Image: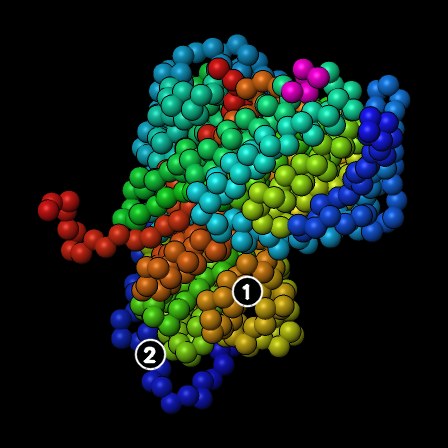
Amino acid sequence: MATAISNRLEVLKTYKIYIGGQFPRTESGRFYSPVSPSGKKLANVCLCSRKDFRDAVVSARGAFGGWSGRAAFNRSQILYRMAEMLEGRKAQFMEELVLQGSSKSNAEKEVNLATDRLIYYAGWCDKFQQLFSAVNPVASSHFNFSVPEPTGVVSIIAPQGDSLLGLVSVIAPVIAGGNTCIVLASETKPLCSVTFAEVLHSSDLPSGVVNILTGMPSELIPHFVDHMDVNAMIYCEKVPAVQKTIREKSANNLKRIHFYDNINWNTDAGQSPYFIQDCQEIKTTWHPVENIAGAGGGY
Amino acid sequence: MATKKKSNTLKLKFDTAWPYAPAPESRSAAQIKDRYELFINGEWQAPLSKKYFGTINPATEEKLSEVAMANAADVDKAVKAARNAYEKTWRKISAKERAKYIFRIARIIQEKARELAIIETLDGGKPIRESRDFDVPTAANHFFYYAGWADKLEYAFLNKKAEPLGVAGQIIPWNFPLLMAAWKIAPALATGNTVVLKPAETTPLTALKLAEIIQEADLPPGVVNILTGAGETGAAIVNHPDINKIAFTGSTDVGKIIQRAVAGTNKRVTLELGGKAANIIFEDAPLDQAVEGVINGIFFNQGHVCCAGSRLYVQESVAKQVIRKLKDRMESLIVGDPLDKNTDIGAINSKQQLATINKYLQIGRSEGAEMYESACKLPNKGFWCRPTIFTNVAQSNRIAQEEIFGPVLSILTFRTDDEVIEKANNSPYGLSAGVWTDKGSKIFNMTKRMRAGVIWANTFNKFDPTSPFGGYKESGFGREGGLHGLLPYVELKNI
C-alpha cells in the first residue's frame, strides 16, 4: 500500500489565462517557464500576445454595462463571495506562494491579507459613493448633485513582487467601483494569479469583469496603454522609462494613468477608498426647481 | 442666405413693429493702457523677449492695446518668483489669512465689475449682457467660494492630509477669459499653491486687469504671476522643470500634446478640453422651454463654449415642430454690436476662428446636410457668423462628430431611448449633455446612461462655483468647481 501511494504520479496543473469567463491558452501558442528562486521550474505559463489582450478588452467592454449597472449591494456580495472562495483555497495558494519562494509563514500571512482586503473592498462597494458625492448649493433655482461613476475599462500591470496580495489589491478597488479590467500577472510569480482566476470563476463574478493574462510586461505594456477602448491604466513599478512611455502613449485617447509605485501592499496603506476614487469620474446633474411667482420657503 | 420656406405656416416677423433702439454700454467706464508688461513677482516687468503684440476688438478690428510676448526666459523668471513665494510666504502664512487674501480679490472684482465687463466684451467680442451678468459675477463668486475653503481643507478629504503641490502653471482659453482665470487661480491659491498663468493670445486684457486687482489686494509678490504670450509661451510653461502642476483648458489636440510633454516628469495634470454635447428632446418635453434651452445651449457666447449643446437629437414625432420653432426663435436673435445691451450674439472671437467655423459650414453642406441661417444683417467690419442650423445631418457627418466652436447646430433625429443613448455616447468626447422630457424616471434613465461629466436636465449651460465641471473620455480629466475642484491641487498624505 505505502509504496503504491508514494509511487503515485502527481497531477500537474496547466496554467491557462482567463478571458471572458473562460480559460483559454494564449492564441499565440507561446509559453514561458518561470523558475523559483531556487531554480526549480514552476510551470509552463502562457506567454500572452497583443491579440489575447485585444480579446480581453472586448470581453471587458462587453461586461462593463452589466457590471456597472448592477446594484452596488450586489457587487459587494460578489466581492465578499470572492473572499470566501479564497479562504477555502488557502492551502493551495500557500503552496503556490511557497513554490514561488515565500516562507510558509509569509505565504500564510499573504493569503490572509489578500482575503481580508477583498472583504475590506466588499464593504466599500456601496459606501464610497456617499463619500465622494455632493449636493451642490448652487445660487440659481436648480437641484444639483455630483456622483462618482466608473471610468470604464481599466488595464492593469499587477505588482511584480506580491504575487497574490498585489493582484488582489489592484483588482479589488477597480471592480468595487464598477469598472471592468484586464490584468497582467506578475511575470516571475504568475501561479497565484491563474489560481485566483478560478476563485473569481466560482464567485458569481460575471464573465469579462476581470480578465487575467500572463506574459512579459515589456512586450504587453505598450498594448495595454495604446488600446483606444481602454479608459484607464494602472502600473505599479518604479521604472521611470516605462512610466514615461505609458504617459506619452496615454495621450492617444487621454487614458487616466495611475502609478502605484510607492505603496506597501502589506500594510493598511495598501487599501483605501481613494484607490476606488482613482478610477471614477464625477458626474454633475442639474435640474430646475420650480419657483412660481418667487414663492418662498414657507410651508 | 436664408432659404425660402415653402411651407404654409405663418412666418413670424420680428423686425418691423417694435425695433430695439441702440442701448450701448459706455466705453469710457473702462481704462485700457496702450501697453501692458508682464506681471511677475508683484510688479510690471518688461519682457526679456523685448517683443509685444497687439490685441484687437473682434467686432471692429481696431487695436485696443499691445501686450508683452513672454518667452522661455520670462517664463523662467515667473516660475522662480512663484517658487520663491511658495517657499517663503504662501505655504507659511496661516490658512485663515490665505483665505482673506482671496476674499479680497473677490471683493475688488465685484467693485470693478462694470469695467471688467466692458473690457471683456471689447477684447473678446461677447455681448455685454453676458460679460456683465455671467462672466464677471461668476468669476468674483468663484474666488469668494474657494476663499472659504482655504482654512477648511481638513474637512474636504476624510482621513487624509491635503498638502499643496507647489507651483501651478495654468493655461486658459479665449472664450471666458476672466472666468477661466478665476477657475484656475482661486482653487490653486486656496489650497496653498502659487501660480503662473497665461491668458489666451486674443484675449489678454481682463487677465491683466486681474493682475492689477491682485496687486491692489496686496497679495504677496510672486504668488500669482501673469504672462501674456502665444503658444510658445504656453509650451515654455508646460516644459519648465520647476513646475509641479499643469492645468489647461483648451482644445483636445493641445491637451494631448501637453500630456505627451509631461511624460517622464512628476508634473500633475488636469485637462479641460473639447466637447460635442448631445442635447436630447423627447416628444413629451415642454417644447417652448426646450427650444429656449437649445438656443441658449448653442448660441450662448457665439457657441464658443466647450460644453455647447452642438448636437441636437429630436424625437422624430416632434422634429418638424421643434425645427420650425427653432428657426423662428433664431430670427429673433439680435446679432451685432457686443457693447449694445440688447445684443444676443456678438462677434466671433478672431479671424482664425471665423475661418474654422466657415470651413465647417462648407463641410456640412458638402456632406449633404441642409443649412439654414438667420436672416440678420451683419456689420461690415469685424468677424461675424449668423446663427446657423444644419438639418438632415447623419451621425457620421463631421459636423456631428467634430467640435466647431461656433454658433452652428447640427440636428439629428431618433425614435427610441436606446437609440438616442447609443448615438449620444458615440463620440470621443464626454464633457456635457442635455435632456428634455417631462418624465422624471426618463430623466434619470438618460442622465445615468449618458457618459458625460455635466448633464443638464430641462436646462442647459448653467454654471456655479459650487458645481464641479469637467469631462469624461477625451474631454479631459479633473474637475473644476465645488468640493471636487480642490483635488487637482492637493497631494493627499496619510495621516
Q: Chain of mark 2?
A: B
Q: Residue at x 83, y 51 (%)?
A: A27
Q: Single out the residue that lies furthest toward the left.
A: A299
Q: Is circle 1 on the same chain as circle 2?
A: yes
Query: Which image quarter: residue A163?
Result: top right
Extent of the magenta region: A104-108
Q: Residue at x 77, y 43 (%)?
A: A16
The three-letter code of the residue at mark 2 reads Leu
Give the alpha-carbon distance from disc 1 to disc 2, as whole Å.
Answer: 33 Å
Q: Residues within 10 Å of mark 2 (few under 14, many from 20)?
A: few
| Number of dots carrying numbers | 2
Going from the N terminus, do you reach mark 1 or mark 2 first? Answer: 2
Query: Which image quarter: residue A62?
Result: bottom right
Q: Specify whether residue B421 is in view.
A: yes
Residue B423 disc label:
1
Q: Residue at x 71, y 45 (%)?
A: A18
Element under disc 2: loop
Q: Which residue is mark 2?
A: B12
